Amino acid sequence: MISTQLSLPGLKMKNPIMPASGCFGFGKEFSEFYDLSLLGAIIIKAATGKTRYGNPTPRVAETSSGMLNAIGLQNPGVDRIIQEELPFLSEFDTPVIANVAGSTVEEYVEVAEKLSRVTHVQALELNISCPNVKEGGVQFGTDPELAAEVTGQVKKVSKLPVYVKLSPNVTDIVAMAKAVEKAGADGLSMINTLTGMRLDLNSKQPIIANQTGGLSGPAIKPIAIRMIYQVYQEVDIPIIGMGGIETTDDVIEYLLAGASAVAIGSANFKNPFICKEIIEELPAAIERYGFTTIQDTIGGAHR
Amino acid sequence: MMIREDMEILSHELVAEKTYQMTLKGDMPSYVKQPGQFVHIMIDPSDSLRRPISIADVDLTSGTLTILYKVLGKGTASMAGKPVGEYLDVLGPGGNGFPIEEVSASRALLVGGGIGVPPLYYLGKQLKEKGIEVTTVLGFQHAGAVFFEDEFRELGEVFVATNDGSYGNKGFVTDILPSLEGKFDTYFSCGPAVMLKAVSKTLGNYDGYLSIEERLGCGVGACFACVVPAPDGDAKGYRKICRDGPVFRTGEVIL
Ligand SMILES: Cc1cc2nc3c(=O)[nH]c(=O)nc-3n(C[C@H](O)[C@H](O)[C@H](O)COP(=O)(O)OP(=O)(O)OC[C@H]3O[C@@H](n4cnc5c(N)ncnc54)[C@H](O)[C@@H]3O)c2cc1C
Ligand SMILES: Cc1cc2nc3c(=O)[nH]c(=O)nc-3n(C[C@H](O)[C@H](O)[C@H](O)COP(=O)(O)O)c2cc1C
Ligand code: FES
């Protein structure tokens, strides 16, 4: 059988499959469905400097081939995440990637510094792309200079590799990718959600209390594939791909476009076993498309 | 513990206006720990989210559970078209229900509104089995929407209110509550948010448990879609409806 093992900065992975940030909590709930040690890695819910309650409800709505969410980065704050949530994940033989968010450069730096001291956290994912908070977040993700600034400052304090999670809500994704690469990013995560809205025809108002939400699911996959395809040609750092993955064929498509590994988000809500099932089916799928290793598959569309 | 399984539709019928009763067969029933828990149903593979529906009854001998649902939108409309013999992808049982083990009631009042009525039926059955006297107040929009009145009557006295007075008392469930003063010591309620607010206000002097609804994402406690604020001073400041609830003791969350 084809080995799916791979190494990325900071991460020795059994396979390229991991749950995406915000769709898997801190792992506890899904550990009741299967052994989390099967996963290539785990990306945990965003951490901010202080406790955040997030947005009013409703926070989610179904859309054609996707969903909107406006959770608003609800989390107990970095200190409590380290004390209360992370110890549980040390029981598993799976690298943890901590998702870092903030409203100011200082907050990103504080959170990153604290998380990079936790022994079983092996990499940071810098969330400069959350569309659902009023300040910070997405501004850092749409302005190449701000993105480079926050990446550079975090790199200074973090002993861990830093993956910068890019927002698709920009006109020039390559410029963003190059800016953070130059600022020292070790890898990229692509993509976060696209800002969207759905109206309730009876109340004639937005369904999501925050009015806008982030669109995820199969609807955004072609956008993610296009962006990864473009960015792969222009940068030298590895890409973790995400957006609408539901099948092994989706995973192959991401690898071909240039992703070295992938994250699965919303699909966990439809099928809590999705990561496990895809991990089991992946070797056969790689073989089916004529590849002998996972490394050959990565960037296969560019040869 | 939650499982995911394909459950066979054993029966499926219209019981009131836009309201269907369905029995599903599988292993799920043996995992149900409390009345008030829900199942999270993937109605069509092309949907992006599951739909939460309360467990209305459980029969361990036949391995079935009963649900009742109202057609409101795309998901429930599609569910209404599912024939007997087909299988539904069900995740569950979810959440924490009514904690009947710890309730010290000797006389219980059930207050249900519209499609919030179903979970109270399985609750009422269990309370009665424990020797607790059960009185039920049900509220519906109008006569055509009334269901399960006879089923509740087997458990005890039943009062029905309709908004337009086309059946039972005219008005809201809260109009009936004052006449029941002294007939119960604990109440259990499920229904629309406005009704729960009114009921908990009217019955402020009693111990009570409320089952709350919100649009869910994951349904398992991982995505923070379904939170309700909890009173200040609480360490967390919120509860997850899908995991900590959907049933809460009055005062545990802010309605
Ligand atoms: C714990 C829990 C238990 C529930 N138990 C039952 C039950 O036993 N029987 C039943 O009929 N319904 C129940 N509901 C509500 C049910 O989940 C929704 O009515 C259903 O998801 C609507 O799906 P839809 O695709 O038909 O509607 P959509 O097209 O999604 O929406 C149509 C309308 O339905 C309403 N709606 C949508 N989602 C919800 C929701 N989560 N809660 C309340 N209203 C909603 C909104 O008013 C919306 O405008 C429960 C909800 C929760 C959270
Ligand atoms: C409910 C929900 C919560 C999310 N929370 C976060 C988050 O905290 N941090 C983050 O970087 N991305 C978050 N995301 C974005 C996902 O990690 C992912 O980038 C996006 O959903 C696309 O993948 P998908 O189509 O597989 O869901 C969230 C997505 C959803 C649906
Ligand atoms: S619906 Fe995801 S946490 Fe409750």
Image: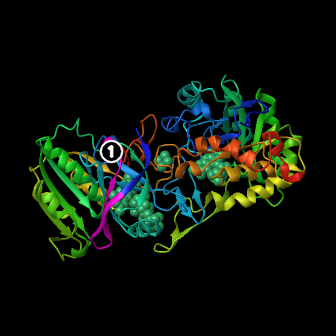
Residue B51 in the image: above or below residue A24: below
Residue B106 in the image, given as x and y percentages of width and height: 12, 41
* Residue B14 in magenta stretch: yes
Q: Nearer the viewer, residue A43 or B244?
A: A43
Image height check: is A134 above or below A88?
A: below
Quarter of the figure with residue B171:
bottom left
The residue lying at 42 percent from left, 41 percent from top is B2
| Chain ID at mark 1 | B
Magenta stretch, main secondary structure, is strand
Q: Quadrant of the N terminus of chain A?
A: top right
| Residue plotted at (69% across, 44% down) | A284
- Whether residue A130 is visible, yes or no, is no
| Residue A161 in picture, x, y percent from top left | 78, 32
Q: Which residue is mark 1?
A: B248
Which residue: 36% across, 45% down?
B27
Q: Nearer the viewer, residue B83 or B114?
A: B83
Q: Which residues are drawn in magenta?
A: B9-30
Q: Tag 1's secondary structure?
A: strand
